[in-house]
């Protein structure tokens, strides 16, 4: 590592004299992060000290406003650092992450346990009815007070000290979990010869050749453990032996014996989370975690999952029988196994609906699908996206766009980072380098979508699967939630909502991806330029319920394992046995594997955001099924009045209103939970 840069020259803590005050990525070096964090943490400590030392009686302005504005440099430095550790991790960055994660936890825990600061917040909360607050201020005060309570502010003595110890230890373990998983995914390569490629589409072969070239492998083709490349191989390869080998490696991420084995970490994480919840007065961690969500308590989340589990099991058994018949008719002398499902499902889909994923991919060019997502945002929310090659980016593959409204006013900067590469964690996500706020001066957001699509050979377009098209629209829905944010307070902006509501804006946006009105315009064949035939569009619509049993059981098994591990009075010592016990209790089919096994379940063990709450996607799916029906009822999927309500009460509103009230303001009523069963074709 290079010598440390003098702080006076450190761009991370300077005002950024760049277009739209974007991070000056080309000027930032890894060795600048430690001193930048040092300076930013000192500034934030000074900000907090100034609030607590204020001799004036607490007011909303000198306490809550001041808290919202505190730590500007820390937000700036962290915005760059945490994005880069997800997209372009190096050993140097990981070393800093291991050091800074517990340090940041100590810092924020000290703030939440600061008695003088909490006294000011509690004083205001006690007088809240007399403060003449507007709706957003009243909600912010309530959330701020409850956040202090939920992070230990009312604890005393030994309990207070123990809470701080637990918080720091959890951060260390969760960081280690994430880095172990990244190491497993980065180090693994599934190398192939030409003779191993039977059944693969040309774009999949080309991507495997490109991976082998980039990673300098001994064999001419290679796959990583990125979901996009694994699922393509499992769906297309006629080599059952290779499908089994790759599938075993895929589901074993995080549990390979040795220093990257995540199983011992999970046991510690679960025990510490349970202890933290009990310190704060909750029976279980699930009770603690679900209190501020739309569900409010574990019973409501359990009821939703139970409502769907039985019909999903019934459907997946029907699907299994049909796939086994396909195996038998093809002369396969074996019982369908988990590594066979995707291959034979695609065969059956092609047979029933004349739908072949390789054929479909020819119409789903990445560039066109990005344009389709932009087009829907323009039709719904009057947004425009202009590619800006003059803006700084953190990797050559990243695209930058300026987002404006119909009057030409600046709305946001959007970064699209679409291709898998070494050092990027798996999956797809939305994040930001800067959130939106009005307090202390208007700031518009800088949003990023990160994907892991296979990078094509230089002479070929990037072709997406049907699932990848949905993923692109899903994450762009999150991005719109960040870009359209229009609130005063930074902690309330964008996606800063409960997890079982935050997925609603992303999941409802998925509906536009496969609408005929969109496909006819953007699904053009990469070789001929011909639009997708109406007959093919009709077959896509007809097949919308195909494989829904499998997809629902695969997801729900993960959600139930997460939920039940966190909703128990004790903590398991051996995660493998605990996971197997839950799956046995719910009668998980032996021919399936849960979507995310615990040792690589980053959603819940690489951080706490979705812990005990992976069910949130299902809750939000209930909202999105009912929510999109509002457009169908209006007779226009771009209906202006419905789109305005969706923008005003959901995408622009951040967390300034209780999410149940926000949904009712958009829809005119509470959600119809039966809409989810209809969407999946279970009724």
Image: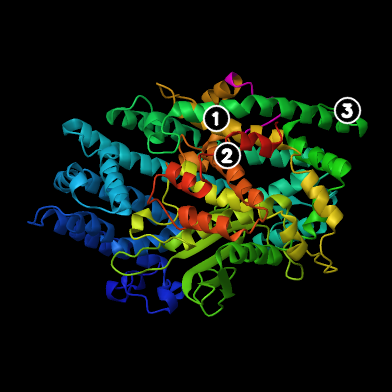
Query: Overall secondary structure of the magenta stretch?
Result: loop
Question: At numbered mark 2, what does the secondary structure look like: helix, strand or loop?
Answer: helix
Does 679 sit left or right of 304 as displayed?
right
Coloring basis for residues: rainbow
Question: At numbered mark 3, what does the secondary structure look like: helix, strand or loop?
Answer: loop
Residue closest to the eye, 2 or 596 = 596
Residue 592 lies in the magenta-colored region = yes
Position of residue 235 relative to residue 338, above or below, is below
For the residues carrying marks 3 and 1, which lies nearer the camera in this image?
Answer: 1
| Residue at the farthest top position | 585
Q: Which mark is residue 304?
A: 1
Judging by the rendered image, the residue that carries numbered circle 2 is 622
Magenta highlight range = 585-594
Residue closest to the eye, 428 or 32 = 428
Say if mark 2 contacts mark 1, CB within 8 Å: yes
Where residue 608 sits, quadrant-wise, is: top left
Residue 196 rendering spot, x and y as whole percentages: 82, 49
Residue 22 rendering spot, x and y as whole percentages: 43, 72
Q: Residues within 10 Å of mark 3 (few under 14, many from 20)?
A: few
Where residue 247 sits, quadrant-wise, is: top right
Is residue 442 visible in the rendered image? The answer is yes
Q: CA distance from mark 3 to mark 1?
A: 39 Å
Residue 134 lies in the magenta-colored region = no
């Amino acid at each position: 590592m290079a010598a440390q840069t003098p702080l006076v020259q450190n761009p991370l803590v300077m005002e950024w004299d760049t277009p739209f005050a974007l991070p000056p990525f080309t000027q930032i070096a890894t060795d600048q992060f430690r001193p930048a964090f040092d300076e930013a943490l000192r500034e934030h400590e000074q900000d907090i000290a100034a609030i607590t030392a204020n001799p004036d009686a607490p007011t909303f302005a000198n306490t809550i406003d001041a808290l919202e504005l505190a730590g500007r440099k820390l937000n700036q430095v962290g915005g760059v650092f945490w994005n880069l550790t997800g997209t372009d991790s190096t050993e140097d960055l990981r070393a800093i992450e291991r050091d800074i994660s517990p340090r940041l936890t100590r810092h924020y825990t000290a703030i939440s346990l600061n008695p003088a600061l909490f006294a000011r917040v509690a004083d205001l909360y006690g007088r809240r009815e007399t403060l003449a607050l507007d709706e957003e201020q009243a909600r912010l005060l309530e959330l701020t007070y409850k956040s202090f309570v939920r992070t230990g502010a009312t604890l005393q003595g030994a309990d207070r000290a123990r809470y701080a110890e637990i918080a720091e230890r959890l951060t260390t373990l969760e960081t280690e979990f994430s880095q172990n998983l990244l190491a497993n995914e980065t180090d693994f390569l599934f190398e192939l010869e030409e003779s191993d490629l039977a059944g693969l589409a040309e774009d999949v072969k080309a991507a495997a050749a490109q991976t082998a070239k980039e990673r300098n492998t001994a064999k001419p083709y290679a796959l990583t453990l990125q979901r996009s490349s694994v699922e393509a191989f499992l769906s297309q390869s006629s080599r059952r032996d290779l499908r089994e080998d790759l599938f075993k490696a895929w589901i074993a991420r995080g549990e390979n014996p040795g220093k990257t084995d995540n199983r011992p970490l999970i046991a510690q994480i679960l025990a510490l989370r349970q202890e933290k919840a009990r310190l704060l007065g909750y029976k279980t961690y699930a009770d603690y975690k679900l209190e501020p969500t739309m569900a409010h308590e574990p019973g409501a989340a359990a009821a939703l999952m139970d409502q769907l589990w039985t019909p999903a099991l019934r459907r997946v058994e029907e699907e299994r029988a049909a796939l086994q018949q396909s195996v038998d008719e093809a002369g396969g002398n074996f019982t369908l196994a988990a590594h066979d499902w995707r291959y034979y499902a695609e065969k059956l889909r092609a047979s029933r609906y004349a739908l072949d994923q390789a054929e479909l991919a020819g119409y789903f060019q990445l560039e066109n699908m990005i344009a389709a997502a932009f087009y829907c945002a323009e039709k719904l929310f009057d947004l425009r996206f202009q590619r800006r090659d003059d803006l700084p980016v953190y990797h050559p593959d990243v695209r930058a766009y300026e987002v404006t409204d119909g009057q030409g006013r600046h709305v946001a900067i959007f970064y699209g980072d679409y291709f898998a590469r070494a050092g990027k964690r798996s999956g797809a996500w939305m994040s930001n380098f800067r959130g939106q706020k009005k307090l202390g001066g208007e700031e518009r957001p800088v949003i990023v979508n990160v994907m892991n699509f296979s990078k094509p050979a230089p002479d070929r377009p990037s072709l997406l699967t049907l699932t990848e098209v949905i993923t692109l629209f899903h994450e762009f829905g999150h991005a719109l939630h960040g870009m359209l944010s229009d609130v005063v307070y930074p902690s309330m902006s964008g996606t800063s909502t409960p997890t079982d509501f935050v997925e609603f804006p992303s999941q409802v946006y998925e509906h536009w991806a496969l609408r005929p009105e969109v496909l006819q315009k953007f699904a053009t064949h990469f070789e001929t330029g011909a639009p997708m035939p109406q007959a093919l569009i009709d077959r896509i619509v007809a097949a919308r319920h195909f494989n829904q049993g499998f997809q629902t059981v695969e997801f729900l098994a993960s959600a139930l394992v997460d939920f039940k591990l966190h909703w128990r009075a004790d903590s398991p010592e051996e995660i493998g046995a605990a996971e197997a016990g839950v799956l046995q209790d719910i009668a998980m089919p032996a021919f399936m594997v849960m979507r995310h096994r615990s040792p690589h379940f980053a959603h819940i063990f690489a951080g706490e955001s979705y812990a005990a709450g992976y069910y949130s996607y299902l809750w939000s799916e209930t909202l999105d099924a009912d929510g999109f029906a509002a457009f169908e009822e209006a007779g226009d999927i771009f209906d202006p009045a419905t789109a305005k309500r969706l923008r005003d009460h959901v995408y622009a509103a951040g967390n300034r209103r209780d999410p149940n009230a926000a949904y009712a303001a958009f829809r005119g009523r509470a959600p119809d939970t039966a809409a989810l069963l209809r969407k999946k074709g279970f009724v």
